[in-house]
Image (tube, grey):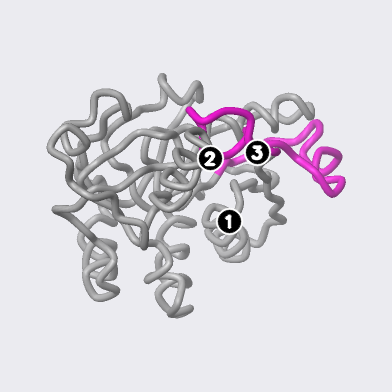
Amino acid sequence: MTTPWAEETRAILLESNALLSDDHFVYISGHHGSGWVDKDAIFLRLERVRRLTQLLAEATGPIQPDILCGPAVGGLIVAQWTAFALGLPAVFAEHDVRRSLDELRGPFSLHRGFERQVAGRRVLVVDDIVNTGQSAVQTAAAVRSAGGTVLAVAALVDRGNTNAEKLGVPEYVYLLEHLIPNWPAAECPLCQQQVPINTHHAHGQEFVDAQQTQHT
């Protein structure tokens, strides 16, 4: 779906050399795919972060939350800058200890007293790049567990693998849809073709390390 902010967002990502393709990437969900949006390349230049989050603030202003919450680390950055543009406070969720090899890290939860900050408040969950939506779903669940009401999920980029219904929220807002297919690791055609996993971007190194640990 094309949004009013898509053209400028794509231009910033291209300028940042953030759109990677034709490789073998592992996502935080454990799924694999052939593309990656390198958010770290965007975050290097704060003027780009500021502009993208100004656009996200424009896109989410009508939602009228009381506070924003993003999953650390990338979602934390976007949530804070978007909150600044909206004149609102922001908190963040963090990974718990990794629980299984299927998920490279444990689920998100609220710490540092942030659960008290969202209790009884209208919350906008903000992420950077939504791949499968797992980080946003877990962050929203953490907010609800703390007594907050999740109004929507918002992101800079949607990978085309989810929607508001799958995320379990009333509304899903993003600046740009950038389609990249993904597969469960056991069904990955790139693995079947023995394409090496990219260990410099995404979560490839964590996946490789986890496999080595499993076999030792």
Q: Mark 3 points at which residue?
A: 123
| 53 is higher (above) or lower (below) than 43 | above
**Highlighted range, magenta:** 97-125
Where in the figure is residue 143, as x and y percent of width and height?
A: 70, 32
Q: Residue at x 68, y 57 (%)?
A: 88
| Comes first in the chain, label 2 or label 1 | 1
Q: Which amino acid does label 2 sit on?
A: Thr
Which x, y percent locates residue 65?
Answer: 63, 42
Q: Which residue is drawn at 54% across and 52% down?
A: 75
Q: Could you tell me which residue is drawn at 20 percent across and 61 percent down?
A: 7
Mark 2 — residue? 213
Residue under pointer 1: 73
Q: Earlier in the sequence, mark 1 or mark 3?
A: 1
Front residue of 127/187: it is 187
Give yes or no for contact between labels 2 and 3 (Cβ–Cβ under 8 Å).
no
* Quadrant of residue 20 within the rendered picture: bottom left
